Image (cartoon, rainbow, N blue to C red):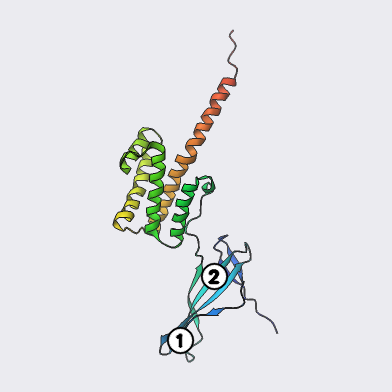
């Protein structure tokens, strides 16, 4: 007797590759049946493991059975838990302070669960916090952004980017605005650009300026003829 290979290919939630997944539990668990007449529905639950990175995921298949006279059951939908990442953390994420890591971790969790109102509100919170750190709590968002431009911490173009995200986040926080997937993607791209500029690029420039001054002092001048 030949035992069939029960491995199936899915997009892994961890390594993001199309990988074979093997059952990591002893068979499937069947949920309750529902439906009326000749059509009924049920779910199967199975724990799968990625062959590439060994990540474990719960796979839920939604089945519909049109009845013995029409054909066998077929899958109408498949869900995975945890869900696929909506947004990957940037490489510099571990270098953020614990406070910012906590805020952004909640934003990423909201995005993975398609909670875009919560994500937009969290983005607004993170931006407000970083602006207060740079120039103090001087009032409205517009005032803070203008001060960042005055101090040449950001450019006028950055101001336009920043205000677009802040306005969207404020609309979510105060008026229940739910950004689309496309709008949320734009918000994340802009936010990470601003954060990298304020938290890392500035520090890198200051460090390089210090090194340049040290180099200039150590460089011998021209000898007088």
Q: Which residue is located at x 48 percent, y 56 percent?
A: 87
Q: Which residue is mark 2?
A: 58
Residue 116, compared with residue 134, is above or below; it is below
Q: Gap between marks 2 and 1, in whole Å?
A: 26 Å
Which mark is in front, 2 or 1?
2
Q: Residue 61: percent from the left, percent from the top?
A: 51, 76
Q: Quadrant of the C terminus?
A: top right
* One can see residue 1 in this view: yes
Q: Please, is residue 29 above or below residue 55 in the view?
A: below
Position of 146 with respect to 212 (left or right) is left
Q: In the visual, does 204 lie left or right of 133? A: right
- Quadrant into which the N terminus falls: bottom right
Give the crowd class for mark 1: few <14, some 14-19, many >=20 residues within 10 Å: some
- Looking at the image, which is closer to me, 47 or 16? 47
Residue 174, numbered circle: none
Q: How many marks?
A: 2
Residue that extends furthest to the bottom in the rendered view of this protein: 69
Sequence-wise first label, 2 or 1: 2
Q: Describe the element under mark 2 as helix, strand or loop.
A: strand
Where residue 174 appears, as percent x and y from the top left, is 30, 54
In the rendered view, would you say 24 is above or below 37? above
Residue 209, relative to residue 166: is it above or below? above
Residue 66 is labelled as 1
> Would you say residue 154 is visible in this rendering?
no
Label 2 close to label 1 by CB (< 8 Å): no
Circle 2 residues within 10 Å: few <14, some 14–19, many ≥20: some
Across and down, in percent, residue 101 comes to: 49, 50
| x, y percent for residue 38 | 43, 90
Extreme-left residue of the structure:
175
- Disc 1, SS: loop
Q: Work out which residue is located at the far right of the displayed protein and give it.
A: 1
Residue, x 52% and y 48% (percent of image)? Answer: 93
């Amino acid at each position: 007797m030949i035992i069939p290979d029960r491995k199936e290919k899915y997009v892994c939630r961890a390594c993001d590759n199309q990988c074979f997944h093997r059952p990591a539990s002893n068979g499937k668990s069947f949920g309750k049946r529902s439906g009326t007449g000749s059509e009924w529905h049920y779910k199967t639950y199975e724990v799968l493991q990625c062959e590439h990175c060994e990540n474990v995921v719960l796979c839920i298949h939604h089945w519909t059975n049109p009845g013995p006279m029409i054909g066998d059951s077929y899958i109408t939908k498949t869900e995975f838990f945890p869900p696929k990442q909506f947004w990957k953390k940037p490489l510099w994420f571990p270098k953020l302070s614990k406070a910012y890591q906590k805020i952004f971790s909640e934003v990423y969790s909201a995005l993975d669960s398609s909670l875009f109102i919560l994500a937009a509100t969290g983005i607004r919170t993170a931006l407000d916090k970083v602006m207060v750190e740079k120039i103090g709590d001087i009032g409205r968002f517009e005032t803070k952004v203008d001060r960042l431009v005055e101090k040449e911490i950001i450019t006028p173009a950055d101001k336009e980017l920043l205000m677009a995200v802040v306005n969207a986040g404020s609309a979510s926080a105060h008026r229940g605005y739910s950004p689309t997937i496309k709008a949320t993607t734009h918000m994340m791209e802009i936010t990470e650009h601003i954060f990298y500029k304020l938290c890392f690029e500035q520090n890198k420039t200051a460090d390089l300026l210090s090194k340049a001054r040290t180099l200039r002092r150590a460089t011998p001048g021209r000898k007088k003829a």
